[in-house]
Image (tube, rainbow, N blue to C red):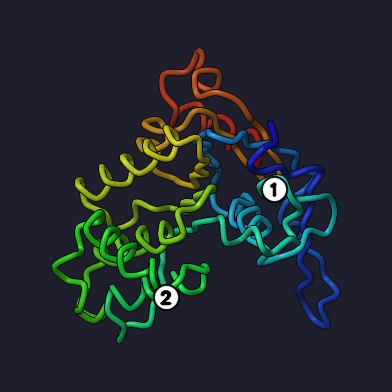
Amino acid sequence: MVAAVEFAGVGKTYKTGLFAKAKVPAVQDVSLTIPRGSVFGLLGPNRAGKTTLVKLLLSLARPTSGNVTRLGEPASARHTLGRIGYMHENHAFPRYLSAAEVLTFYGGLSGLSSEELPGRVNALLERVGLADRRAEPISRFSKGMVQRLGLAQALINDPDLLILDEPTEGLDLLGRQLLRDVVTEFKKAGKTVLLVSHVLEEVQAVCDELAVLVGGTVVFRGKLNDLTAGKPSLEAALRGLYTAGR
């Protein structure tokens, strides 16, 4: 079966400093395969390279070396972006738009027709608990409500690959349960979820496998039980990896 995501010997170096002569490696020789139909966790301390990998996957940056494959095609094949949903921890929705207007806009960008958009928007607003606030400007929304809208936006195109980047930021208990339910539904449908998170409880609750990045390199890739074997907790296992990788 073709993998949902594959990083093959991927490196990314950013240029910085005066006249951009200095080079800072963000990730180095990362090889990682994410199977279709899995819920895969990506963990690591700050500045480990997680955001860089997501940017490479979303074609927001190009690798300095190696290859990135997305849904069986090179990441440079931008038409596959229409099959991806992405939820970020900090959304930059225009605050004068309403929830329904935001979803309609992004649905149009994703290629949904004008005939199917209204039904899709209504269903998703109901799904994330914002149906009664559909006409209000986002400027009136709390952080948690914006996060719920961000989840709906990530689902608007019924994606095959869902990328959740610190998705629980600002969500209450019901919001977190909603997110878990969505992840479970994706798995049952044979779709793929990539979860980038520092919230270990969420990782333990939903992930089949995970990878740990430290200093731009993969220091662990496997099942959760393998990582925690002989350790009192996932936190303790990660602390050991983070410290060893410094």
State the image coordinates of residue 69 (x, y, percent, origin top left).
Answer: 73, 48
> Toward the viewer: 240 or 108?
108
State which quadrant residue 94 falls in: bottom left
Which residue occupies the extreme front position in the image? 115
> Toward the viewer: 178 or 83?
83
Q: CA distance from mark 1 to mark 2?
A: 27 Å
Residue ID for mark 1 = 216
- In the displayed structure image, the side of residue 2 where residue 96 appears, left or right: left
- In the displayed structure image, the side of residue 139 where residue 58 appears, left or right: right
User: What is the number of callouts on the image?
Assistant: 2
In this view, the mark in front (1 or 2) = 2
Q: Quadrant of the N terminus?
A: top right
230 is higher (above) or lower (below) than 150: above
State the image coordinates of residue 187 (x, y, percent, origin top left).
Answer: 45, 34
122 is higher (above) or lower (below) than 228: below
Which residue occupies the extreme left position in the image? 132
Which residue occupies the extreme top position in the image? 230
Residue ID for mark 2 = 92
Mark 1 closeness class: few <14, some 14–19, many ≥20 residues within 10 Å: many
State the image coordinates of residue 18 (x, y, percent, origin top left).
Answer: 80, 81
State the image coordinates of residue 74 (x, y, percent, origin top left).
Answer: 76, 53
Lower position in the chain sequence, tag 1 or tag 2: 2
- In the displayed structure image, the side of residue 215 where residue 14 appears, left or right: right
Q: Quadrant of the C terminus?
A: top right
- Going by the numbered disc 2, the residue's amino acid type is Ala
Q: Residue at x 50, y 13 (%)?
A: 230
> Toward the viewer: 109 or 154?
109
- Going by the numbered disc 1, the residue's amino acid type is Gly
226 is higher (above) or lower (below) than 218: above
What element does badge 2 sit on? loop
Q: Residue at x 54, y 29 (%)?
A: 209
